[in-house]
Image (cartoon, coloured by chain):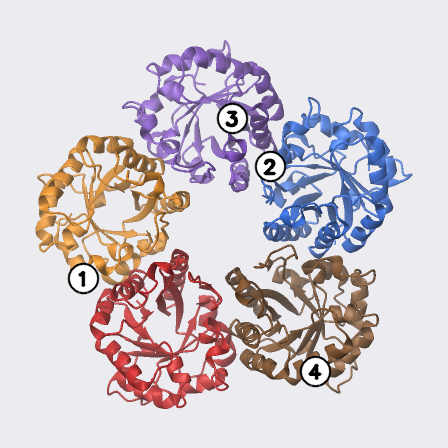
Chain colours: A orange, B purple, C blue, D brown, E red
Amino acid sequence: MVDTSVIERNGKVMLLAYDQGFEHGPVDFNDKSVNPEYIMKIAQNGDFTGVVLQEGLAARYYKKESDIPLIVKLNGKTSFQGEEPLSLQLCTVRKAADMGAVGVGYTIYVGSQYEEQMLVEFSRIEDEAHDRGMIVIAWMYPRGKKVAGRETDRDVVAYGARLGLELDADFVKVPYTGDPESFSWVVRAAGKTGVLAQGGKKTDWENLEEEIGGVMQAGAAGIAIGRNVWQDDNPNQVSMKLADLVYGNVKKENGI
Amino acid sequence: MVDTSVIERNGKVMLLAYDQGFEHGPVDFNDKSVNPEYIMKIAQNGDFTGVVLQEGLAARYYKKESDIPLIVKLNGKTSFQGEEPLSLQLCTVRKAADMGAVGVGYTIYVGSQYEEQMLVEFSRIEDEAHDRGMIVIAWMYPRGKKVAGRETDRDVVAYGARLGLELDADFVKVPYTGDPESFSWVVRAAGKTGVLAQGGKKTDWENLEEEIGGVMQAGAAGIAIGRNVWQDDNPNQVSMKLADLVYGNVKKENGI
Amino acid sequence: MVDTSVIERNGKVMLLAYDQGFEHGPVDFNDKSVNPEYIMKIAQNGDFTGVVLQEGLAARYYKKESDIPLIVKLNGKTSFQGEEPLSLQLCTVRKAADMGAVGVGYTIYVGSQYEEQMLVEFSRIEDEAHDRGMIVIAWMYPRGKKVAGRETDRDVVAYGARLGLELDADFVKVPYTGDPESFSWVVRAAGKTGVLAQGGKKTDWENLEEEIGGVMQAGAAGIAIGRNVWQDDNPNQVSMKLADLVYGNVKKENGI
Amino acid sequence: MVDTSVIERNGKVMLLAYDQGFEHGPVDFNDKSVNPEYIMKIAQNGDFTGVVLQEGLAARYYKKESDIPLIVKLNGKTSFQGEEPLSLQLCTVRKAADMGAVGVGYTIYVGSQYEEQMLVEFSRIEDEAHDRGMIVIAWMYPRGKKVAGRETDRDVVAYGARLGLELDADFVKVPYTGDPESFSWVVRAAGKTGVLAQGGKKTDWENLEEEIGGVMQAGAAGIAIGRNVWQDDNPNQVSMKLADLVYGNVKKENGI
Amino acid sequence: MVDTSVIERNGKVMLLAYDQGFEHGPVDFNDKSVNPEYIMKIAQNGDFTGVVLQEGLAARYYKKESDIPLIVKLNGKTSFQGEEPLSLQLCTVRKAADMGAVGVGYTIYVGSQYEEQMLVEFSRIEDEAHDRGMIVIAWMYPRGKKVAGRETDRDVVAYGARLGLELDADFVKVPYTGDPESFSWVVRAAGKTGVLAQGGKKTDWENLEEEIGGVMQAGAAGIAIGRNVWQDDNPNQVSMKLADLVYGNVKKENGI
């Protein structure tokens, strides 16, 4: 098993996600956040243990000598796709490694009619990344008619988390189920695979605090969060408050 | 032909199956059985001749120095799929071998409209596994509109078993037809390929005893069983009683 | 061009076909014929110039030191498929050669909507087999809505035979058109590619004699026959009578 | 660019096409023309600059020491296909070269819903053939609902011819548009790619003379013709008259 | 990152596009423009920093010793395709390099139901081209039901441009949004990836001037234009006027 400590602090993970330009388009951005350099500063200055980028942003904005670990998201799809999404590999593991990534990410739309195709592609990526000693993170997102309306249900989310374990992912990124008790079942279903909660749409701090607090209380390994940070007027402040929730009392000292 | 004795005792096979987390999701589990370490103890202490795991569980929970032989299930699908299932390879034969497996498993949904695709993929896996001297077990499960309502019929089950022989599987795992006479035709159709009956859903001991008794009376090579063991309050006791039925009077001595 | 004499006697071919366990399932078998060892004895003792088996039967029942040449049928499908069949490669040419085969067989369902896919796969197999000096036999079976009701028509059968020639098959196996005159057009359409008639369902000797007599009268290269032999109570007797029709007055002496 | 002079005489091309056995079946043949040896004699004795065959005929009837250059048609489909045809590669470029071919042919059904698939396959074949110094001829045949009723329209035929140029074919074979003026636009659209008109169904000499005369008047590189030659009672006479139209006053002397 | 200066002048790009013969057919051409030699003269004499051709035109009309840089368009489709276009690779990167190209182009139909397939293929091409040090230009064209009527909307065009950045394209070619303000958002969304506006259908100079002026005012990297140049009676004059708009006051001196 690969060493995951490079993206951990106090045993916990807090990733800054910035793949929304691909998944949603620039509609998620304002004049500041449309600029990847703005995000890279947040990643550097905030308390994150890693940043998640697609290939092009990694190639043109990420510096290897940076002290923020890089996760390259390998697949992607646009928001023009329909109810049964299919997201395929757009960057090789080798390329990610060449750009300095310590890990790779891949989304599996659990419940989509194209689910099996993504399971197959993920399984090959997982092999290759682990052979290179890279961390493998599976975005396990429930989608499609089979799970419509149940995307954050305990059993559906736990199923996705379990698949991550059965597929030998090091971490799964899943939606929060809404309360610590149900989410702790998700964490148990994932076994030795760490569970990261996704941040989701921008919400106010009270909601976010309750959510992330519940996530960590349930025993999750951490979070991967984007819009709630870089859509905020004060992203560094948000990131510090999140760090308190995720890492507990540990303070940042010399890098992560 | 490969040597199958490594998973045989008194010429018979009794495998502990634990791939349900992938195929059905954690709904099959309770607080104990959700933990693969609990299952690994049952596999070690029970009278099994092997344990069946998906790649991730094998990688994170199976120990090569263990005295329970490992079968890695190479393909898988979720319960979100519809009436015509397609299950594809998610772990390479090489990876299974690297993790210490003595054999590999693969499900063919006989009757599914995607049947041919699985036949093709199985045939490649069979070649590679046999080239490595590994045991090949084909899960031959009738599914789909063409066999709906006939999934345990003599002729349907015997067809699946025969396909296993024609495809050069060492063992087929099939549903029980319900009585020893019809199941003996299944066994004969499989020729030199051994027939393993699946355990299926949890039932009480009387039913299970009659079923497994009939399976062995029909000349089967053994069973592959999961829920009836690890959903039971006393899995070791169940496993010992099953061993009596499968191996006959032979008692466990030094490992399997 | 490869040497085909290894499966010829007096320039004629008489193959024992036993791939029905795959194509139809064990329903074609009785207590005797379900056992491949029974068939292997018929193949050895009868006047056949070769036996046709799927990979698994060849691997587990065929002996290289046997004096009956082996043809491995490389593709197969179950009877669960619908009106537009697709049969794909399930055994490599290399594996067939390793098991001692002198030739390979492949079915193309002429008229099926998947026809082109089988033409493509056959063309690759033909290349590889001929590169190894192996005999290539194409089962050219009319199927699907486009030829429904015309499966044994002169023009449809002749088209299939001609395709075999254009694809560089050494032999085509086709259904009989019902009379020598129309079948002689099939033979001419096939040019230097030899034509083998299929045996089909069990019928009485009078019908069979008239059919095979017509086939040979039309100038065919021979027959490939299964059920009419091994479903008969006296398969060796049937095979001897067939040999008279196929080889003419030539008697078996030292093997084929 | 490859040297095309090997299939030219007086700078013009006249190919004998005999791939109809694959594309239409033996219905196009009579007792003479069904025999490829009959065709090979016409090819040798007539004034053709090349003969077009599928792999099987080339392998079994073409002699390398022959003085008629060989073009192997690499893809093919049967007449059982529907309105939107798909024709795929059935012979490798290497095999064609091994059999002595100086060029290869490939059909793209322009307008078919499977058009893109054939464009892709052609592009790979073109690369490989040109790397070997072989001549590449693209059959650009309008087909499918999108061009129904317009298969010989100036703009449709010119589009096909232009695609041949854009794809780097040495020659395109297209249907005649019916008059020299419109066909001269086809020729101009093809630029440095030579245009060959197809012969089509058997017609009387007056029609054929007017058609081929118009083709050459439009500046075409020549013709590829089959049925109008070998379905004729006197194929050598027809071929000589065609040669007059195609090559002008040049007479055959020492081979082509 | 590759050096893009070879197709830049004063930091700006002005490409002559001539792939319409493939995409639209010869209907876009008149007696002059149908001839690629005519276009090559315009490319040489005009103020362009590169010319865009499909493989066949590059192979037969482009001279390596030419002083106009070559971009080979790698994929293409005909106008016979329907509302949801799919355009696939028809020329290898290696072949483009062999012909002297400094860059490659590839169209992704953003919004098409086949979008993902093109994203995947582009990502492989991008890797290979960048490994060879070649410039990568992505044609990001909104198409299909999902974006119907919104093909030039700010958010749709900006999404396409952003995808180009996320995919690591050096330049994207996109439709103009109609006004400099909205187009400047497109430019910002593309970040370090340069934005080229497409020329589109022939229009009069006033419209064209306003459009290209707006494009450059928005901060674009330049334009890729065809019909408005070579359909004009005086293409060199148009190209000079365009050069003024694109490069500003810089005059051509010694080649580009």
Q: Which residue is mark 3?
A: B174
Amino acid carrying label 4: it is Gly
Element class at badge 3 = strand
Q: Residue at x 75, y 71 (%)?
A: D228
Q: Is residue E250 above or below residue B117?
A: below
Crowding at dot 1, Cα within 10 Å, few <14 / some 14-19 / many 20+, comes out as: some
Front disc: 3 or 1: 3
Disc 4 and disc 2 in contact, CB within 8 angstroms: no
Q: Which residue is mark 1?
A: A37
Q: Residue furthest right?
A: C249
Mark sitting on residue D213: 4
Front disc: 3 or 4: 4
Mark-to-mark CA distance, 4 and 1: 69 Å
Mark-to-mark CA distance, 2 and 1: 59 Å
Mark-to-mark CA distance, 3 and 4: 71 Å
Amino acid carrying label 3: it is Val
Element class at badge 4 = helix
Q: Residue at x 48, y 33 (%)?
A: B107
Instruction: Say whether mark 1 and mark 4 are on the same chain.
Output: no
Q: Which residue is mark 2?
A: C78
